[in-house]
Amino acid sequence: MAKNDFKPFATGEGANVLSQAEFEALDAVENGFQTGIARSEQLNKVWRQASTIASVVASFMADKSGSDVVDNGDIATLQATLLKALLSNSKAQLDSHYLQTEKNLADLNSAEKARGNLGLGSLALKNSLSAADVGAFPAAGGSVGSQGIKSPGVFVNNHTMPGNSQGMYMLWNETNGGGEGALVCNKGTGDGGFVLRTVNSTNTVETGRITINGSGDLNTSRYLTEMGQRAYSPNNPPSQLNGGGWFKDVATGFIIQWGTTSNGSANIENHNYNIAFPHAALVTIGTLGVNQDPGRVVYLQATNNTVFSSKTTSNGIGFSWIALGY
Protein backbone atom coordinates (compact mmCIF):
# COMPACT_ATOMS: atom_id res chain seq x y z
CA MET A 1 0.00 0.00 0.00
CA ALA A 2 1.29 3.47 -0.89
CA LYS A 3 2.55 5.68 1.93
CA ASN A 4 0.70 8.88 3.00
CA ASP A 5 2.58 11.44 5.14
CA PHE A 6 -0.37 13.81 5.50
CA LYS A 7 -2.30 13.03 8.67
CA PRO A 8 -5.40 14.62 10.19
CA PHE A 9 -4.77 16.79 13.27
CA ALA A 10 -6.73 16.70 16.59
CA THR A 11 -9.17 13.96 15.56
CA GLY A 12 -8.82 11.80 18.68
CA GLU A 13 -11.61 11.22 21.17
CA GLY A 14 -11.82 14.16 23.61
CA ALA A 15 -9.62 16.37 21.44
CA ASN A 16 -9.37 20.00 22.57
CA VAL A 17 -11.38 21.62 19.79
CA LEU A 18 -14.47 23.77 19.53
CA SER A 19 -17.76 22.14 18.59
CA GLN A 20 -19.01 22.80 15.10
CA ALA A 21 -21.73 25.10 16.39
CA GLU A 22 -19.23 27.05 18.50
CA PHE A 23 -16.85 27.32 15.55
CA GLU A 24 -19.53 28.60 13.20
CA ALA A 25 -20.50 31.27 15.79
CA LEU A 26 -16.90 32.38 16.24
CA ASP A 27 -16.16 35.93 14.98
CA ALA A 28 -12.77 34.77 13.71
CA VAL A 29 -14.49 32.56 11.08
CA GLU A 30 -15.23 35.67 9.03
CA ASN A 31 -12.48 38.09 10.13
CA GLY A 32 -9.65 35.79 11.21
CA PHE A 33 -7.91 35.87 14.57
CA GLN A 34 -7.19 39.36 15.89
CA THR A 35 -4.74 40.51 18.54
CA GLY A 36 -5.24 39.03 21.97
CA ILE A 37 -5.06 35.66 23.64
CA ALA A 38 -4.78 32.66 21.31
CA ARG A 39 -7.12 29.97 22.57
CA SER A 40 -5.96 26.43 21.81
CA GLU A 41 -9.44 24.94 21.17
CA GLN A 42 -10.06 27.58 18.51
CA LEU A 43 -6.74 27.04 16.73
CA ASN A 44 -7.10 23.26 17.00
CA LYS A 45 -10.45 23.49 15.24
CA VAL A 46 -8.94 25.42 12.34
CA TRP A 47 -5.95 23.09 12.06
CA ARG A 48 -8.16 20.00 12.22
CA GLN A 49 -10.37 21.20 9.39
CA ALA A 50 -7.40 22.00 7.15
CA SER A 51 -5.46 18.82 8.02
CA THR A 52 -8.47 16.54 7.70
CA ILE A 53 -9.20 17.66 4.13
CA ALA A 54 -5.47 17.50 3.26
CA SER A 55 -5.32 13.94 4.64
CA VAL A 56 -8.42 12.86 2.70
CA VAL A 57 -7.01 14.24 -0.55
CA ALA A 58 -3.59 12.69 0.12
CA SER A 59 -5.18 9.31 0.92
CA PHE A 60 -7.12 9.48 -2.34
CA MET A 61 -3.90 10.25 -4.20
CA ALA A 62 -2.04 7.35 -2.61
CA ASP A 63 -4.87 4.79 -3.01
CA LYS A 64 -5.79 5.61 -6.61
CA SER A 65 -2.31 6.30 -8.00
CA GLY A 66 -0.42 3.57 -6.12
CA SER A 67 2.37 6.10 -5.43
CA ASP A 68 3.64 7.39 -2.10
CA VAL A 69 2.45 10.85 -1.01
CA VAL A 70 5.44 12.25 0.86
CA ASP A 71 5.59 15.47 2.90
CA ASN A 72 8.90 16.70 1.48
CA GLY A 73 7.87 19.95 -0.21
CA ASP A 74 8.10 18.40 -3.76
CA ILE A 75 5.10 20.17 -5.28
CA ALA A 76 5.71 18.88 -8.84
CA THR A 77 5.64 15.25 -7.69
CA LEU A 78 2.47 15.85 -5.63
CA GLN A 79 0.76 17.40 -8.66
CA ALA A 80 1.77 14.47 -10.88
CA THR A 81 0.51 11.98 -8.30
CA LEU A 82 -2.82 13.84 -8.01
CA LEU A 83 -3.28 13.81 -11.80
CA LYS A 84 -2.44 10.09 -11.94
CA ALA A 85 -4.98 9.38 -9.20
CA LEU A 86 -7.69 11.39 -10.95
CA LEU A 87 -7.11 9.63 -14.29
CA SER A 88 -7.03 6.19 -12.68
CA ASN A 89 -10.21 6.84 -10.72
CA SER A 90 -11.96 8.31 -13.77
CA LYS A 91 -11.12 5.25 -15.86
CA ALA A 92 -12.37 2.88 -13.20
CA GLN A 93 -15.59 4.83 -12.72
CA LEU A 94 -16.30 5.64 -16.39
CA ASP A 95 -15.26 2.49 -18.27
CA SER A 96 -18.62 0.87 -17.61
CA HIS A 97 -20.52 3.93 -18.85
CA TYR A 98 -18.59 5.06 -21.93
CA LEU A 99 -17.19 3.32 -25.04
CA GLN A 100 -13.49 2.59 -25.07
CA THR A 101 -11.63 3.16 -28.33
CA GLU A 102 -9.30 0.20 -27.86
CA LYS A 103 -12.28 -2.20 -27.71
CA ASN A 104 -13.64 -1.14 -31.14
CA LEU A 105 -17.30 -1.11 -30.00
CA ALA A 106 -16.97 -4.62 -28.50
CA ASP A 107 -17.99 -3.17 -25.14
CA LEU A 108 -21.56 -2.49 -26.30
CA ASN A 109 -24.12 -4.48 -24.33
CA SER A 110 -26.24 -5.09 -27.45
CA ALA A 111 -24.49 -4.58 -30.77
CA GLU A 112 -27.72 -5.38 -32.66
CA LYS A 113 -29.70 -2.75 -30.75
CA ALA A 114 -26.93 -0.20 -31.24
CA ARG A 115 -26.93 -0.78 -35.01
CA GLY A 116 -30.69 -0.36 -35.07
CA ASN A 117 -30.35 3.01 -33.36
CA LEU A 118 -28.30 4.24 -36.33
CA GLY A 119 -31.53 4.62 -38.30
CA LEU A 120 -30.51 2.27 -41.12
CA GLY A 121 -33.58 0.08 -40.83
CA SER A 122 -33.26 -3.67 -41.30
CA LEU A 123 -29.88 -3.33 -43.02
CA ALA A 124 -28.27 -2.28 -39.75
CA LEU A 125 -29.46 -5.47 -38.05
CA LYS A 126 -27.70 -7.83 -40.47
CA ASN A 127 -24.31 -9.33 -39.74
CA SER A 128 -23.57 -9.32 -43.48
CA LEU A 129 -25.21 -7.89 -46.60
CA SER A 130 -26.08 -9.76 -49.76
CA ALA A 131 -26.15 -8.29 -53.25
CA ALA A 132 -29.95 -8.27 -53.08
CA ASP A 133 -29.92 -6.26 -49.81
CA VAL A 134 -28.24 -3.31 -51.51
CA GLY A 135 -29.43 -3.81 -55.09
CA ALA A 136 -25.96 -4.78 -56.29
CA PHE A 137 -24.93 -6.96 -59.21
CA PRO A 138 -24.01 -10.42 -57.86
CA ALA A 139 -20.51 -11.26 -59.00
CA ALA A 140 -19.99 -14.79 -57.66
CA GLY A 141 -16.54 -16.05 -58.50
CA GLY A 142 -15.38 -12.82 -60.10
CA SER A 143 -15.74 -9.07 -60.26
CA VAL A 144 -17.17 -6.41 -62.52
CA GLY A 145 -14.68 -3.65 -63.30
CA SER A 146 -15.54 0.02 -63.47
CA GLN A 147 -15.48 -0.16 -67.29
CA GLY A 148 -16.96 -3.66 -67.52
CA ILE A 149 -20.66 -2.84 -67.97
CA LYS A 150 -22.08 0.51 -69.02
CA SER A 151 -25.71 1.54 -69.00
CA PRO A 152 -27.60 1.06 -71.17
CA GLY A 153 -25.24 -1.86 -71.61
CA VAL A 154 -26.49 -5.35 -70.90
CA PHE A 155 -30.04 -6.24 -69.92
CA VAL A 156 -30.30 -9.87 -68.88
CA ASN A 157 -33.54 -11.65 -69.84
CA ASN A 158 -35.30 -8.32 -70.17
CA HIS A 159 -36.04 -6.70 -73.50
CA THR A 160 -38.32 -3.98 -72.23
CA MET A 161 -36.43 -0.86 -73.21
CA PRO A 162 -37.59 2.71 -73.73
CA GLY A 163 -38.80 3.57 -77.21
CA ASN A 164 -36.09 4.45 -79.75
CA SER A 165 -33.37 3.70 -77.19
CA GLN A 166 -30.17 1.96 -78.19
CA GLY A 167 -28.66 -0.87 -76.20
CA MET A 168 -28.01 -4.57 -75.96
CA TYR A 169 -29.43 -7.39 -73.89
CA MET A 170 -29.05 -11.13 -73.45
CA LEU A 171 -31.76 -13.78 -73.45
CA TRP A 172 -31.94 -17.48 -72.86
CA ASN A 173 -34.76 -20.02 -73.23
CA GLU A 174 -36.67 -17.43 -75.24
CA THR A 175 -38.34 -20.05 -77.45
CA ASN A 176 -40.26 -22.64 -75.41
CA GLY A 177 -37.36 -23.28 -73.06
CA GLY A 178 -35.19 -24.74 -75.80
CA GLY A 179 -31.95 -23.88 -74.01
CA GLU A 180 -30.83 -21.34 -76.57
CA GLY A 181 -29.09 -18.08 -75.76
CA ALA A 182 -29.49 -14.83 -77.64
CA LEU A 183 -27.52 -11.59 -77.81
CA VAL A 184 -29.89 -8.91 -79.05
CA CYS A 185 -29.10 -5.45 -80.41
CA ASN A 186 -31.83 -2.92 -79.76
CA LYS A 187 -30.93 -0.51 -82.57
CA GLY A 188 -33.45 2.18 -81.72
CA THR A 189 -33.18 4.86 -84.39
CA GLY A 190 -29.76 3.59 -85.52
CA ASP A 191 -28.70 0.93 -88.03
CA GLY A 192 -28.17 -1.89 -85.52
CA GLY A 193 -25.89 -4.88 -85.91
CA PHE A 194 -22.80 -6.24 -84.19
CA VAL A 195 -19.05 -5.78 -84.56
CA LEU A 196 -16.48 -8.32 -83.33
CA ARG A 197 -12.94 -6.96 -83.34
CA THR A 198 -9.45 -8.08 -82.36
CA VAL A 199 -6.73 -5.55 -81.64
CA ASN A 200 -3.05 -5.58 -80.79
CA SER A 201 -1.75 -5.75 -77.22
CA THR A 202 -1.70 -1.95 -76.85
CA ASN A 203 -5.25 -1.55 -78.20
CA THR A 204 -4.03 0.78 -80.92
CA VAL A 205 -4.35 -1.31 -84.11
CA GLU A 206 -7.30 -3.38 -85.28
CA THR A 207 -6.10 -6.82 -86.42
CA GLY A 208 -9.39 -8.45 -87.39
CA ARG A 209 -13.09 -7.65 -87.76
CA ILE A 210 -16.39 -9.46 -88.25
CA THR A 211 -19.55 -7.42 -88.72
CA ILE A 212 -23.20 -8.41 -88.77
CA ASN A 213 -25.27 -5.50 -89.95
CA GLY A 214 -28.83 -4.73 -88.96
CA SER A 215 -30.17 -6.85 -91.83
CA GLY A 216 -28.14 -9.92 -90.83
CA ASP A 217 -25.42 -9.68 -93.49
CA LEU A 218 -22.11 -11.20 -92.36
CA ASN A 219 -18.80 -9.65 -93.42
CA THR A 220 -15.28 -10.64 -92.43
CA SER A 221 -11.95 -8.92 -92.90
CA ARG A 222 -10.40 -12.21 -94.08
CA TYR A 223 -11.43 -15.78 -94.78
CA LEU A 224 -14.32 -18.01 -93.74
CA THR A 225 -13.33 -21.55 -92.83
CA GLU A 226 -15.30 -24.75 -92.34
CA MET A 227 -13.93 -27.82 -90.56
CA GLY A 228 -10.56 -26.12 -90.46
CA GLN A 229 -10.50 -25.47 -94.22
CA ARG A 230 -11.10 -22.26 -96.06
CA ALA A 231 -14.60 -22.06 -97.52
CA TYR A 232 -14.88 -20.73 -101.07
CA SER A 233 -17.81 -19.02 -102.72
CA PRO A 234 -18.51 -17.27 -106.03
CA ASN A 235 -17.39 -13.99 -104.49
CA ASN A 236 -14.54 -15.65 -102.58
CA PRO A 237 -12.87 -18.08 -105.06
CA PRO A 238 -9.55 -19.87 -104.56
CA SER A 239 -6.55 -17.77 -105.48
CA GLN A 240 -5.46 -20.40 -108.04
CA LEU A 241 -8.02 -22.74 -109.53
CA ASN A 242 -5.24 -25.00 -110.92
CA GLY A 243 -3.97 -25.69 -107.40
CA GLY A 244 -5.50 -27.85 -104.70
CA GLY A 245 -8.77 -26.69 -103.24
CA TRP A 246 -12.39 -27.49 -102.55
CA PHE A 247 -15.80 -25.92 -102.94
CA LYS A 248 -19.04 -26.68 -101.10
CA ASP A 249 -22.48 -25.74 -102.34
CA VAL A 250 -24.13 -24.25 -99.28
CA ALA A 251 -27.66 -25.08 -100.41
CA THR A 252 -27.11 -28.81 -101.11
CA GLY A 253 -23.91 -29.68 -99.25
CA PHE A 254 -22.34 -31.00 -102.48
CA ILE A 255 -18.51 -30.78 -102.38
CA ILE A 256 -15.98 -30.66 -105.24
CA GLN A 257 -12.27 -31.19 -104.46
CA TRP A 258 -9.24 -31.15 -106.71
CA GLY A 259 -5.47 -31.34 -106.67
CA THR A 260 -2.28 -32.41 -108.51
CA THR A 261 0.54 -34.88 -107.98
CA SER A 262 3.89 -34.47 -109.78
CA ASN A 263 5.40 -37.91 -109.17
CA GLY A 264 2.99 -40.83 -109.29
CA SER A 265 4.05 -44.39 -108.51
CA ALA A 266 3.50 -47.78 -110.10
CA ASN A 267 2.75 -48.97 -106.57
CA ILE A 268 -0.51 -48.21 -104.82
CA GLU A 269 -0.28 -44.92 -102.89
CA ASN A 270 -2.78 -43.27 -100.54
CA HIS A 271 -3.59 -39.56 -100.66
CA ASN A 272 -5.66 -37.39 -98.31
CA TYR A 273 -8.49 -35.35 -99.69
CA ASN A 274 -8.16 -31.64 -99.04
CA ILE A 275 -10.98 -32.03 -96.51
CA ALA A 276 -12.84 -35.12 -95.37
CA PHE A 277 -16.24 -35.59 -96.99
CA PRO A 278 -18.75 -35.39 -94.10
CA HIS A 279 -20.94 -38.20 -95.50
CA ALA A 280 -19.52 -39.92 -98.60
CA ALA A 281 -16.93 -39.67 -101.37
CA LEU A 282 -18.89 -40.48 -104.55
CA VAL A 283 -16.22 -40.58 -107.23
CA THR A 284 -12.55 -39.71 -107.72
CA ILE A 285 -11.30 -39.16 -111.29
CA GLY A 286 -7.74 -38.65 -112.58
CA THR A 287 -6.05 -37.41 -115.71
CA LEU A 288 -2.43 -37.37 -116.85
CA GLY A 289 -0.47 -34.23 -116.23
CA VAL A 290 0.87 -31.85 -118.85
CA ASN A 291 3.46 -33.27 -121.30
CA GLN A 292 2.79 -36.88 -120.26
CA ASP A 293 2.81 -39.84 -122.67
CA PRO A 294 -0.83 -40.47 -123.62
CA GLY A 295 -0.11 -44.18 -123.62
CA ARG A 296 0.36 -44.18 -119.88
CA VAL A 297 -2.56 -44.54 -117.50
CA VAL A 298 -3.44 -43.40 -113.98
CA TYR A 299 -5.90 -45.38 -111.86
CA LEU A 300 -7.74 -43.73 -108.89
CA GLN A 301 -10.12 -45.17 -106.32
CA ALA A 302 -12.06 -43.61 -103.44
CA THR A 303 -10.94 -45.58 -100.38
CA ASN A 304 -13.09 -43.81 -97.80
CA ASN A 305 -14.34 -40.29 -96.94
CA THR A 306 -10.81 -39.13 -96.14
CA VAL A 307 -8.42 -41.02 -98.41
CA PHE A 308 -8.18 -42.07 -102.06
CA SER A 309 -5.68 -44.46 -103.69
CA SER A 310 -3.63 -44.05 -106.90
CA LYS A 311 -1.53 -46.21 -109.23
CA THR A 312 0.18 -45.28 -112.49
CA THR A 313 1.52 -47.57 -115.24
CA SER A 314 5.07 -46.42 -114.44
CA ASN A 315 6.87 -44.33 -111.86
CA GLY A 316 7.28 -40.57 -112.13
CA ILE A 317 4.00 -39.84 -113.88
CA GLY A 318 2.28 -36.62 -112.83
CA PHE A 319 -1.51 -36.43 -112.69
CA SER A 320 -4.40 -34.25 -111.65
CA TRP A 321 -7.48 -35.45 -109.79
CA ILE A 322 -10.99 -34.31 -108.98
CA ALA A 323 -13.36 -35.81 -106.39
CA LEU A 324 -17.09 -35.42 -105.87
CA GLY A 325 -19.01 -36.10 -102.69
CA TYR A 326 -21.13 -34.57 -99.95
Image: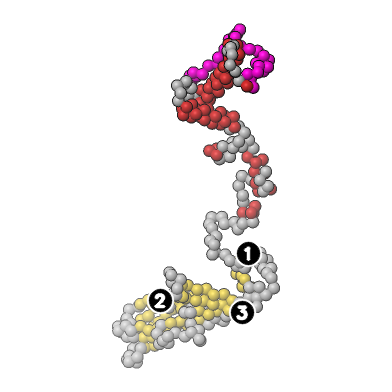
User: Mark 3 and mark 2: span between their CA atoms?
Assistant: 46 Å
Among the 4 quarters of the image, the one containing residue 60: top right
Residue 21 colored magenta? yes
Q: Label 2 is placed on what type of residue? A: Asn
- Residue position marked by numbered label 2 in the rendering: 272
Q: How is the image coloured?
A: secondary structure
User: Mark 1 and mark 3: span between their CA atoms?
Assistant: 22 Å
Highlighted magenta segment, given as a residue range:
1-30
Q: Label 3 is placed on what type of residue? A: Asp
* Rendered location of residue 175, percent (x, y): 66, 68
- Residue position marked by numbered label 1 in the rendering: 156
Residue drawn at 66 percent across, 45 percent down: 118
Q: Is residue 74 left or right of residue 162?
A: left
- Dominant SS of magenta comes to loop
- Residue position marked by numbered label 3 in the rendering: 191
Which is more toward the observer, 143 or 292? 143
Among the 4 quarters of the image, the one containing residue 39: top right
Residue drawn at 34 percent across, 85 percent down: 318
Secondary structure, mark 2, is strand
